[in-house]
Amino acid sequence: MGLIANYNCVNDKNLKELKGLGSSEEELFETVEEWSDEDELLLDIDKMWDVLHFVLTGVSANHIIDDNPLSQAVLGVTSIEDLSEYMAYTEHSKIVDILAALEQFDIEQALESFDMKACKEAELYPNIWDYDEEEEEIIDEILHDFEQMKVFYKKVLEAKGHVVVTIC
């Protein structure tokens, strides 16, 4: 198993509840998981979150770029501190900017210069960058996840929802 990124669309009530949960980390993640079970508006990009962030921004997800909607698309806007796993949320007011940035981003052009060696040098997760024979498959997965992310954020915008990102 590895670190998997999941994106949940949540309503106003759930976001308010999340912000108010001052309880244990376990309860926080259980609550978000319960919402995932109830809601159909989800996105799972599995282990490709770090490389997707790298393709979109030029840096690993270890380097959150404040006020960059492409970084925020992958990592959320407001991270919840002092957790052993990663959790962040994005309020609805930021979704328009994130979606616009995703729609304006030329993923095809970015992937033309995709380089497995650069991914290895940047120490991106997951550590699959020595498998040159899988480069085409990896590029296809990045493209698929990017397109799914655009669809997800468009649906969140239409639903007037917020996004909770978990990477665990």
Image (cartoon, grey):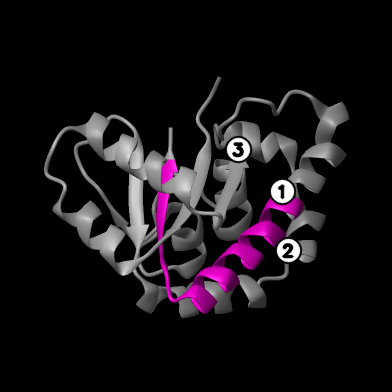
Separation of residues labelled 2 and 3 (CA atoms)? 19 Å
Residue, x 57% and y 79% (percent of image)?
100
Outermost residue on the top side: it is 1
Where does residue 151 sit, x and y in percent of width and height? Answer: 65, 66
Q: Is disc 2 placed on a helix, strand or loop?
A: helix
Q: Are marks 2 and 1 in contact (CB under 8 Å)?
A: yes
Location of residue 91 (image quadrant): bottom left
Which numbered marker is on residue 13?
A: none
Q: Is residue 131 magenta?
A: no
Is residue 62 in sight in this rendering? no
Q: Magenta span covers which residues?
A: 144-166
Q: CA distance from mark 2 to mark 1?
A: 9 Å
Q: Earlier in the sequence, mark 3 or mark 1?
A: 3
Q: Where is the C terminus found, in terms of image quarters?
A: top left
Q: Is residue 144 visible?
A: yes
Where residue 70 appears, as percent x and y from the top left, is: 52, 64
Query: Which mark, residue 107?
Result: 2
Q: Residue at x 51, y 41 (%)?
A: 5
Residue at the extreme left: 22
Q: Nearer the viewer, mark 3 or mark 1?
A: 3
Q: Please report the residue visible at 84 percent of the width from the left and 38 percent of the height from the top.
A: 137
Label located before the other in sequence (2 or 1) = 2
Mark 3 to mark 1 CA distance (whole Å): 11 Å
What predominant SS class does the magenta segment belong to?
Answer: helix
Task: Tell me the amino acid under the disc marked 3.
Answer: Asp
- The residue labelled by disc 1 is 142
Q: Which circle marks residue 46 in the picture?
A: 3
SS label for mark 3: strand
Mark 1 element type: helix
Amino acid beneath label 1: Ile
